[in-house]
Amino acid sequence: MLLLLGVPERSVMGIMGWSHTAMAARYQHVTSAIQRDIALRVGGLIWQVSEGPADDK
């Protein structure tokens, strides 16, 4: 749930009391919602919409 909220992994570790990243890896799963969000962010970087030519009025 914390990943879905965008909480950084290091913060999740502190909240959950995990001292090793292996524990985080064991309990954190990449959901389809997270995968979709990542795809949209990457797509936005690759396929940025141009502003178009500036109007000289």
Image (spheres, rainbow, N blue to C red):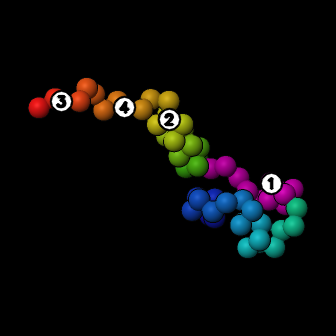
The residue tagged 2 is 45
> Looking at the picture, which amino acid does disc 3 mark?
Asp
Report which residue position mark 3 lands on: 55
| Callout in the foreground (2, 3) | 3
Where does label 4 land, which residue? 49
Question: Measured along the vertical axis of the image, is residue 54 above or below residue 24?
Answer: above
Closer to the eye: label 3 or 4: 3
29 sits to left or right of 55: right
Front in this rendered view, residue 37 or 41:
41
User: Mark 2 and 4 residues: CB-CB less than 8 Å, in contact?
Assistant: no
Q: Say above or below: 52 vs 26.
A: above
The answer to whether one can see residue 11 in this image is: yes
Q: Nearer the viewer, residue 12 or 48?
A: 48
Q: Amino acid at mark 1?
A: Ala
Task: Name the N-terminal-most of marks 2 and 3.
Answer: 2
Judged by its main secondary structure, the magenta piece is: helix
Lower position in the chain sequence, tag 1 or tag 4:
1
Report whether residue 36 is seen.
no
